Structures are given as C-alpha cells and as structure tokens.
Amino acid sequence: MNGFSELSFDFTKGIASIRSSLLVILDKWWETHPLPWDEIDAITQCMMQMMAFKIRSLEVSLEGMPLVPNGKQQTLHVDFSTAAAIVRSIYEMAFIFHHIFVATENEDERDILLYIWKIKGYSNRQAIPIPEEMKIQKQQNEETIESLKNRVRDILKRISITPEAKHEIEDVIKKGHILKGYRFRKTNGVITKFESVALSESNSFINSDLIDGTYTFLSYQSHPSYLGIEQFGSISNPRQYNYEKINYLFPACFFASKFTNDACTILSDGVVIKKETVPNPFATINILSCI
C-alpha cells in the first residue's frame, strides 16, 4: 500500500454508538439527578431521549423490508425518502438546540430565543382547527402565547439593545410560524441587530464544510418529488442499497454527535457524566466532538 494505511469508518456502527452513548449518559444522569429538575435540564434530557428515538427509527428504516411476503429470501428494499425525513429531523433538532442553548452568550439571550421557540410552537397549535368543546383550551393557549411575548418584552427593557434590534425581535414574536434559528449581532456589547438563520445554513452550527448543502438534499429527498420516485425505482440490489445508505448515515452521525456533545455542555454535570460513561476516545461522539 505504498507506506500508507487506509482508515475506514463504519457509519452503521457509528450511529449505533451515538445512540448507546446517549442512553448511557441519560441513565447515569437520571440516577444522579432526581426530580425536580430546572427547565433547561428538563428540556435537554427530553430532547436527548427524542434524539435516541430518532436514531433508532433511522436504523430500522435502513434495515429495509421485503416487498413480496412469500417467506423466501429476497432483497430488502429501503424507502430512502423515509430515511431522509428522519435525518432531516435529527439535523433540525441539533440546529435548534445549538442556536438556543449553546450559541447564546448569556441567560437573557438564551431566554429570548427559548421564548420565541415556545411562541412559534404554541402559535402552530393555535392554527389547528378545533371542535367547539375545546375553545377553553384554545383560549388558554392564546394566554400562554401572550405571557411568553410579555416575558420577551420584559427582557428587552433591561438589556443593552438598539431600538432597531428591539423592533426586529418584536416583529418575530408577533408573526410567523416558520422554524428558524436566530443570532444577536453586537457592537461594543450592545445588540444592534437580530438576524434569522435559515435551517439550510449548516455552517452556523457545524464546524465543517463536509455537509454543506445536506439540508437541501434531505429536504428534496423527503418530499414526494419525481427524483425520489425515480431513485426508488432504480435501486434493485443489496449492493446499491448499501452504497446509498452512506448518504444518510454519514450526515446522521455528524448531526447526532453534534447534538449529543452540545447537550452534555448544557445538562447539569453533563460533561463530567459523559467522561465517566463514555471514556473511550474512539466512541463516535468523541471522535466527532471537534465539529
């Protein structure tokens, strides 16, 4: 091999390693941190559970299934549009968590983004048609939204922020249900601009250009587009399936690992517990911790 050795990485084992790491960290954290939890810990551990489920759903979807239930040995077909939707969901969770809990510089900034995230969630629920007997719940939902908006406004009264940036935040809490990230721009410690960050901007939370364009790829793959149907119809043997799976396992490892490492920095004692429960430097979340 001309003095060189080839380094290979099994992404199927890699994503399983991340799921195992998540679960062992959670198990230790629950053991050492009994209820009651503060809100940030409660949200973080819940999202970690959800991430473990998303990973397992991806693994199951990539196992494939036979199309003819005749009991005979046959090709296990994979619907990659399903896998794409799951990986996109992994991406979105890693993206949102990073922008709210990791990228913010202080509690006020974090709380502004946390409340905006909640407002958008409750606003989406408010838009769902409901029967007459649920009008009280809808009114309670509306009151929750208004309470969260007022919490944001209370923070804006005490922080260093320009009128222009304050207006930009006010505009965000008043309208729109689209999931986005946000960032604060500052000059001499004063917030001068409040910018939205599109989900497709992967370099806003991943320190690598290896996955540029991945969110766009996952989006069009998960939609019922002609390209997705054409791809499904063109794959017919196990070798093709194994080759294609890398397109989904590779980014899933990146995003799930990023989320896990971020979550451990926010969860109380998370970094310590991670070191205790996942000490192996070759565990996937440790290998990819630099991203």
Image (spheres, helix red, strand yellow):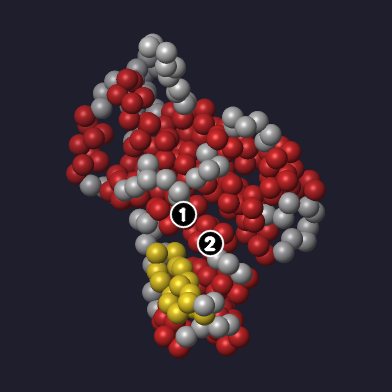
Q: Would you call the spot at circle 1 few (<14 residues within 10 Å), some (14-19), or many (20 or more)? A: some
Looking at the image, which is closer to me, 1 or 78? 1
Q: Position of residue 180 (x, y in %)?
A: 42, 64
Mark with earlier residue (2, 1): 2
* In the image, farthest residue toward the top: 1
Q: Is residue 285 left or right of residue 176?
A: right
Residue carrying label 1: 205
Helix, strand or loop status at disc 2: loop
What's the distance in space between the residues labelled 2 and 1, CA to CA? 8 Å
Looking at the image, which is closer to me, 6 or 48? 6
Amino acid type, label 1:
Phe
Q: Position of residue 170 (x, y in %)?
A: 45, 83
Residue carrying label 2: 103
In the picture, which quadrant includes the N terminus?
top left
Amino acid type, label 2:
Ala
Q: Quadrant of residue 42?
A: bottom right
Residue in the picture at 58% in, 67% down: 105
Q: Position of residue 22 (x, y in %)?
A: 62, 41
Residue 267 visible in this rendered orientation of the protein: yes
